[in-house]
Amino acid sequence: MGDAVSSESYTPRQRTTYRRRLEDELERFDRHLQAAEFVDHGTIGLELELNLVDDAMKPHPNNQAVLAQLGDEYQSEIGAYNVEMNHPPLSIAGDGLDRLAEGVAKRLATVREAAERAGSHLATIGTLPTMTSQFLDSDAWMTQENRYAGLNNSILESRGELVKIDLRGEEKYTHYFETIAPESTCTSMQLHLQVAPNRFADAWNASQAIAGVQVALSANSPLFLGHKLWHESRIPVFKQSIDTRTKELINQGVRPRVWFGERWITSVFDLFEENVRYFSPLLPEGRAEAGAPFMNGDNPGLHYLNLHNGTIWRWNRPIYDPNGEVSHIRVENRLLPAGPTVTDIVADAAFYYGLVKALSNQTRPVWSRLSFEAANRNFIAGARNGIEAEVEWPTLGTVAVTELAEKYLLELAAEGLRSLDVDTSCADEYLGVIEGRVRARQNGAAWQLAALDKVATGSKPATSERADGLARVLRQYMKNSQAGAPVHTWTLEVE
């Protein structure tokens, strides 16, 4: 989806040609995997999606004015009130986690300064609690670029009906949208893990196995359009926003484009093959029109395969990157929300990288003892209930996610970081943040809900009392976030 897109709509001939090229490139990818040399040393990196708000804490569709002041590490997102920050890859060994924290903090400060000069303020949060249905129903929400208009048009044409968001939590929310605007509210942190192709399956399976734990401990999106819904409402909102299926297709078992998956894998090829087999192209943009090269040095560019992969939103997405002297494969872990602080972000990264490494090294890995269906149930439970969730785990049965983390997974993550040659002081510092979160039973979602209950006790959705409370909570959240102390230490004092 980062590629240039020249059109907002496509002809049947373009779609037919694209499908043929896509199938050809899948076979080319298979041959490349079997015969080519790939980068075989692991590196880490991340992308962070950010929100812009105005003085009243409302979404501010001002990303073009902000981006005009920034370099290539910063990009637009589909929401005109969003900016994406990219951190270049680095080694996790030694003080890599501290260097990641320094890099993220420096880049966030750069975006924040640019936003302030443009009349906006920066919010690092999973979903803006002050977002409204009225704003998303307006024309102001979308960044005016062909790739976003084309994506919106293709999804609506495929679906043939309005986009329905229907969620139940402590409160309920139902609304029909004429665009995929709700997708723009789902701001995330995406962790990158570069691995050798022969290690990819283990890394992806491990990522899937811990997805429920990750989202439960790090939930930060409990207030969607002013309603108390899931602790990580981003998960169902994203799925519903860009679902191309009608009710009949859902009943027939057609897969959603926002997808957890349905099985453990043995190769990265399994995932790309599923993409081609199960999903029709949304953006059938030709290679020449997109300005994409056929080859990047000795590496096949695979424009068609990569663009198609970018329109299937797996929570752990496979990435083939042909850039550089030697191509590489990576896992893109997409399920975490943005924020709350730089320390929390790097703690989440340390927990993920350490756990994936440790689980991948096991002789009897967790995915050989945990059904894929159970992993999916864990993911939904974590998103729905956050840090209070219960999950299934081999030998333990159903267990509180906090107990599982404190008594088992944190030590495993520490073991994984040791095998990655991470300095002990770094590992202890950032895993200590996760431990503190577990013991305090407070992540971003828990804090937001408790803070709202304090400043707007008993308030109802769509009331002025709720709206004023949401603005106060977001303003305090932004102050706490910039101050930098991890979220488990935040008090409920709201100015």
Image: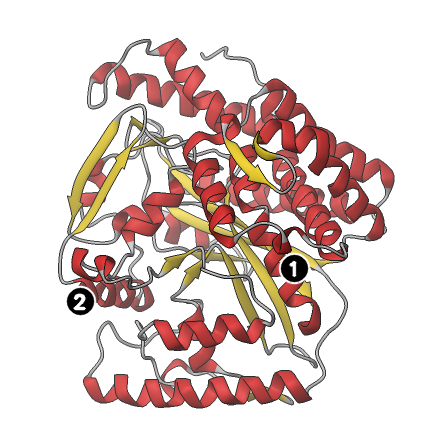
Counting residues from the start of the chain, the first of labels 1 and 2 encountered is 2
In the rendered view, does 192 fall on the left or right side of 51?
A: right
Q: Residue at x 63, y 40 (%)?
A: 348
Q: Is residue 33 visible?
A: yes
Mark 2, secondary structure of its residue: helix
- Residue 433: percent from left, percent from top: 69, 29
Residue 123 can be seen in this image = no
The answer to which of 234 and 101 lies nearer the viewer is 234
Where in the figure is residue 129, as x and y percent of width and height?
35, 30
Number of numbered discs overlaid on the protein picture:
2
Instruction: Please report the residue visible at 54 percent of the width from the left and 46 percent of the height from the top.
Output: 211
Quadrant of the rendering where the C terminus is positioned: top left
The quadrant holding residue 236 is top left
Rendered view: 230 above or below 370 = above
Residue 31 lies left or right of residue 177; in this view the side is right
Q: Residues within 10 Å of mark 2 (few under 14, many from 20)?
A: some
Q: Are marks 1 and 2 in contact (CB under 8 Å)?
A: no
User: Quadrant location of the N terminus?
Assistant: bottom left
| Residue position for label 1 | 203
Viewer-proximal residue among 31 and 469: 31
Q: Residue at x 63, y 56 (%)?
A: 368
Tell me how far mark 1 sits from mark 2, CA to CA. 36 Å
Q: Amino acid at mark 1?
A: Ala
- Residue at the left extreme? 161
> Which percent across, then down, holds residue 186?
39, 45
- Disc 2 residue type? Glu
**Left or right position of 480 against 100:** left
Q: Which mark is residue 157?
A: 2
Q: Residue at x 61, y 77 (%)?
A: 323
Foreground pick, 69 / 207: 207
